[in-house]
Structures are given as structure tokens and as C-alpha cells.
Image: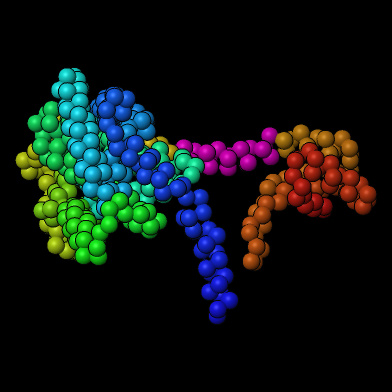
Amino acid sequence: MSNILKEINKFRHEFFDLEQDRAGFSEIIEDIEKGTEFKGTNLWILIFAIMVASVGLNVNSPAVVIGAMLISPLMGPIMGIGLGLGTFDFQLIKKASKNLAIAVTISVLTSAIYFYLTPLYEAQSELLARTTPTIWDVLIAFFGGLAGIVAVTRKEKSNAIPGVAIATALMPPLCTAGYGLATGNFNYFFGAFYLFFINSVFISVSAFIIIRFLKIPYKTWVDVAQQKKMRNYVWIVVILTVLPSIYLGVGIVQNSIFKRNATNFIDQEFDFDESKVLESKLDAKAKTIEIYVYGEPLTKPQLVELNKDLGQYNLSDAKLIIRQNKENIQIDNLSEMKTGIIEDLYKKNEEVLQSKNEQIGFLEKELSRYKKYETIHDEISREIEAQYPQVTKCAMNEMIIHENNAPNDTLTLVYLSSKKRLSNSEIKKLNNWLKVRVKDENIKLIFE
């Protein structure tokens, strides 16, 4: 047992030890402290990065947004707060927090100015994705922060740091907050700012954890009570940050499950020849499935059966509302309705056309098979009579052979009537000639 434990410990030390390529404590502290500065070069880079990210979100270009995240210097002060917490360097915490506040203010204002001036007002998907943070964003920020602080504490800096900047996505939420400010949409503003707050808190917490794991010395001496107090403060901030994201995450999961089940229900149960689904509206919060149907109205028994079938899709508590073409149907977008009808008709015509083409292809194949022997029969008969004058009659056709426990096969049957029986060598020669002439290896000769 002791040998196994030794081997496990050896394996852990060889592959998981963070001390092997760790930079010196003074080097780590110096690098992180340097990154907390926000003046001159860093400040201008931040402004330019914010402009790039704002344009990327405005035109819905993920590549541009990623480029902005790569050049953003926002990670520095957040890591600085984590280092300050881990070493009880209150001056560093104060400095990093101040610089982060300045950076955030400038970022939001820069983005707000851009979105106020741009002629493109519509919120694109890249922008909307930053308005509803969930527990998954917490996990991304936490594990991304762990990767980042581990990379920062190495002698040789790896390419993990740019990757962390992309994964944790500090820039887009600030740009989205600027968009919300510029357009007066404070739901976007607070949602995006909450996402940025999640990222900042959990990157700092992950930095704090690794700093303490590496046992970097405290800046000032603190007793056990103060250490415990600091840890409690960290836990309080973490819990207060996480709780809303859990609530939002649960809501998104429930909404996704409801919509998936409702979509399956519509796809599977609304398969009627004379009635088609024109549009469906799913409301997970109100638990309603509203379906617009055109064509032959559904009968009362059909409606009853559909309501019964809801339970099979875990939708027992959902309310099914069916709007039929005899009712006063209000469709949000008439062009979408027309498009839906045309697409459905086109799809049906395509299916019918494909089926008919398959039938035509099959019949053409069968016809060509029968015409093959009709075309060459006279030619082969004359050629056989020229080679073997004693042959007086010739008939040929394709036959289907059926054997038990075997797939059906085809056979070319050739019937010959002769005044004088052909010799075995002549029969063999004729058989080989027919295989080449008919292009079929499966030949059966019958003589009379």
C-alpha cells in the first residue's frame, strides 16, 4: 500500500506540481503590480480596444470582438485585486480597485459615445448574448481566472493568457453596458454590468486561491482572526455574486427544456394531411403553446387527443391554444405567413416530384431490361444460324431465379432447336460467345 501511495505522490509531483517552473515571488508580484497601472499607453490601448469591440458587437462580428479581447489590458487590475487579497496588501487592493473603476468608467463612456453616434441601432446576437449572465458564466470566469493566474506565475509566460482574455470576455459586457446607456435600455446595462462583475469577482477569487496555494508571503503580518475575517468577506462577495446567476441559469434551463419538449410535441403530433402548422408561439413562463393552423380545421376529438398527448412530452401543466383558419387569427408578420405557406407547398411538391422521379427511373430501368432482348434477339439469332446452320430456332429472355435462404438472382435463358445436336466443344464455345455478346456471365443454354 505504501508503495502505491509513493507512486501516486511521485506521479502528482511530476505532472501536477506548480512549483517546478514557478517564477520567483518578487517577480510574480512585480509583474502583477505593473499590470494594474492604467495611464498613458495602457489607457489608450483600452480606449482603442473598446472601440474595436463596440464595432464588432455593432456589426455582429465575433472575430472583431475576439481581436478586441486580445488587446484589452483589463485583466491586470483584476489580477492585482486577487494578489492584494492573497497577500493582505491593502495598498495594492486600493490601487487596483481605483484603476479598475477608472478603466470601467472610461470603457462604458467610450462605448456609449460610439453607440450614440452609430447609425446601426439594432441589438445584434453578439450583443444580446451579454445581457443575461448565468451560472455558466461564473464557471467560465473562475476556471479562466485559474488558468490566467497559473500562467502569470510561471517563469515563461505561455499562450494561456490571451486565451483567458478571450474566454472570460471582459470587454464585450462593458460595450453592451455602453449600448444600454446610449439607448436608454437599462435592462441591457445592468445585465451586461452584472456579467462584467461576475467575471471580475471570480478572476480575482481564482487569483486569491492560487496566491495562497503557492504560499506567496503576506505583505503585512496578520493574525489568524484577520485571515478568517478576510476569507469570510471573500465568501460573502462570492455568494452574493453567484446567487442571481443561479436563478437566471435555472430559468434558462427550464425555458430551454420547455421549448424543446413543445417543439417535439408539435413536430410529432401535428402531422395531418389536410392541416398544417403555420406558426407556433411558445411561452415557457406562462406555460402556453399557441399554434396557428391552416387548412382543414381540426375536429373536436382531434383537439381532445392533442391535449391528452401533452403528458407524453412532460407538458402536462402546459396550456395548448390552437388558432384555426376559421377563427380571427392575428399573425404578427404577414410576410412570414406567406413565406411559410409557400415553403410548405414547395416542400410538398419537391417530395411528390422526387417520388415520381424514382418511379419513372424504376420503370425506365424495367423497360430497358425488356427492350434489351427485343433489340438484340434478331441479331443474335442470325449470328448463331450463320455459325451453326443446324440451328433452326432461337429464343432468349431474362429469368428471375429464386432459391430458399438466398437472394433472388437473374439468368439469361437461351433456347435452341437444332436438326443435329451440337458437340460438347461447340456448346462450350457457343456458351462463351453468348456471355460476351449478351454481356451476362449467367447464361443457361437449353437444346431441343
**Secondary structure mainly formed by the magenta segment:** helix
Q: Is residue 288 visible?
A: no
Residue for point 49% across, 58% down: 17
**Does 413 appear above or below 48?**
below
Q: What is the span of residues highlighted in magenta in the rendered image?
A: 355-375
**Does 33 appear above or below 44?**
below
Q: Is residue 243 left or right of residue 417?
A: left
Residue for point 23% across, 44% down: 91
Residue 402 or 149: which is nearer the viewer? 149
Q: Position of residue 164 (x, y in %)?
A: 37, 42
Picture quarter with the N terminus: bottom right
Residue for point 63% across, 41% down: 369
> Hey, which residue is sitting farthest bottom in the picture?
1
Q: Position of residue 218 (x, y in %)?
A: 31, 54
Q: How many marks?
A: 0
Q: Position of residue 178 (x, y in %)?
A: 17, 31
Residue 62 or 88: which is nearer the viewer? 88
Q: Is residue 176 left or right of residue 87?
A: left
Q: Identify the coloring.
A: rainbow
Asked if residue 369 is among those painted magenta in the image, a careful observer would answer yes
Q: Is residue 424 left or right of residue 46?
A: right
Residue for point 56% across, 75% down: 4
Residue 8 or 323: which is nearer the viewer? 8
Q: Position of residue 433 (x, y in %)?
A: 84, 41
Asked if residue 31 is among those painted magenta in the image, a careful observer would answer no
Q: Is residue 177 left or right of residue 140?
A: left
Residue 388 or 86: which is nearer the viewer? 86
Q: Is residue 404 visible?
A: yes
> Hey, which residue is sitting farthest left in the picture?
328
